[in-house]
Image (spheres, rainbow, N blue to C red):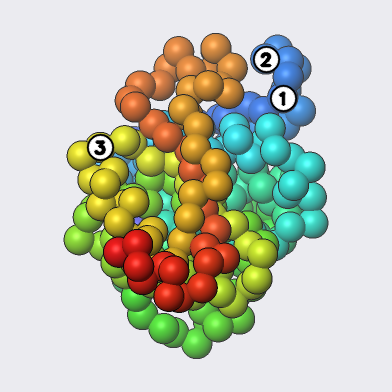
């Protein structure tokens, strides 16, 4: 809710909080930190979930890959992984559902808060708006985007297009290893994708960060399958 001067009313401010996420080898003297505006009264897009923390840490640990990379974060929400990439010198586009205007507005606020210049784009999975054709990422990030099974096909359609639009690109995603895991494997085959790296999300987390998280979280790197269409179809 906005007041007459455009400021938030006290009832809204009390629902918001700023969390800070540090990165570096020294807990006491981190290389940098990212501040995230979270809103406790809004939907899940405005929380920093464990998958996002783990993916952002992986970005930091793989930082040499991200210097100068073109990065697109899908379903960015609070955008911690994408902002971490931006801090490391990536050219970053942060995307979320075009209909989630409050989430997109929050992304812009968080970019300003951290003094980072990122492109913020409304991108609804499975819909081919003009903007998607200009995206040619070398790295695609997605934290907990494999959440709602009903959206998987639209997600994989969008993801496959982006990977095809930028040869040699890769998706790096973190997700809870829920009962839908076999569906994810099936959809990778269906859309001609393959997993080239699969890690326990806690295997590379510093102990001081891991202690505050929970869940059975996987990190996967996914690329286009180089096999031809006939071979891919024979696997389905």
Residue at 59% across, 57% down: 170
Measure the alpha-carbon separation of dots 2 and 1: 7 Å
- Residue 152 visible here: yes
Residue 151 vs 203, above or below: the answer is below
Measure the alpha-carbon separation of dots 3 and 2: 31 Å
Q: Which residue is mark 3?
A: 178
Residue at 72% across, 24% down: 24
- Could you say which is closer to the camera, residue 170 or residue 15? 170
Disc number placed over residue 24 in the picture, else none: 1
Element on which disc 2 rests: loop
Labels 3 and 2: the sequence-earlier one: 2
- Could you say which is closer to the camera, residue 224 or residue 180? 224
**Mark 1 nearby-residue class (10 Å; few <14, some 14–19, many ≥20):** some
Residue at 46% across, 61% down: 193
**Mark 2 nearby-residue class (10 Å; few <14, some 14–19, many ≥20):** few
Which mark is nearer the camera, 3 or 1?
A: 3
- Could you say which is closer to the camera, residue 16 or residue 160? 160
Q: Do tag 3 and tag 1 residues touch (Cβ < 8 Å)?
A: no
Q: Do tag 2 and tag 1 residues touch (Cβ < 8 Å)?
A: yes
Element on which disc 1 rests: loop
Residue 137 vs 220, above or below: the answer is below
Q: Which residue is mark 2?
A: 27
The N terminus sits in image quarter: bottom left
Taking the image as shown, residue 118 lies to the left or right of residue 149, namely right
The C terminus sits in image quarter: bottom left
Q: Do tag 3 and tag 2 residues touch (Cβ < 8 Å)?
A: no
């Amino acid at each position: 809710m906005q007041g007459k001067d455009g400021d938030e009313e006290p009832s809204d401010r009390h629902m918001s909080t700023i969390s800070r996420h540090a990165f570096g080898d020294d807990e006491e003297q981190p290389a940098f930190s990212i501040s995230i505006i979270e809103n406790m009264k809004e939907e899940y897009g405005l929380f920093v979930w464990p998958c996002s923390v783990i993916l952002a840490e992986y970005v930091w640990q793989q930082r040499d890959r991200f210097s100068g990379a073109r990065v697109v974060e899908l379903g960015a929400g609070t955008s911690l992984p994408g902002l971490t990439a931006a801090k490391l010198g990536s050219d970053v586009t942060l995307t979320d559902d075009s209909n989630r205007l409050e989430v997109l507005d929050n992304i812009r606020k968080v970019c300003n808060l951290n003094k980072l210049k990122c492109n913020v784009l409304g991108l609804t999975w499975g819909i081919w708006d003009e903007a998607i054709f200009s995206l040619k990422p070398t790295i695609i990030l997605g934290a907990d985007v494999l959440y709602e099974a009903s959206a998987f096909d639209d997600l994989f359609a969008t993801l496959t297009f982006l990977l095809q639009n930028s040869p040699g690109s890769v998706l790096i995603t973190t997700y809870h290893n829920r009962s839908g895991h076999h569906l994810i494997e099936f959809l990778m085959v269906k859309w001609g994708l393959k997993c080239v790296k699969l890690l326990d999300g806690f295997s590379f987390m510093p102990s001081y960060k891991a202690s505050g998280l929970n869940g059975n979280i996987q990190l996967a790197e996914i690329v286009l399958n180089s096999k031809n269409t006939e071979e891919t179809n024979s696997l389905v």
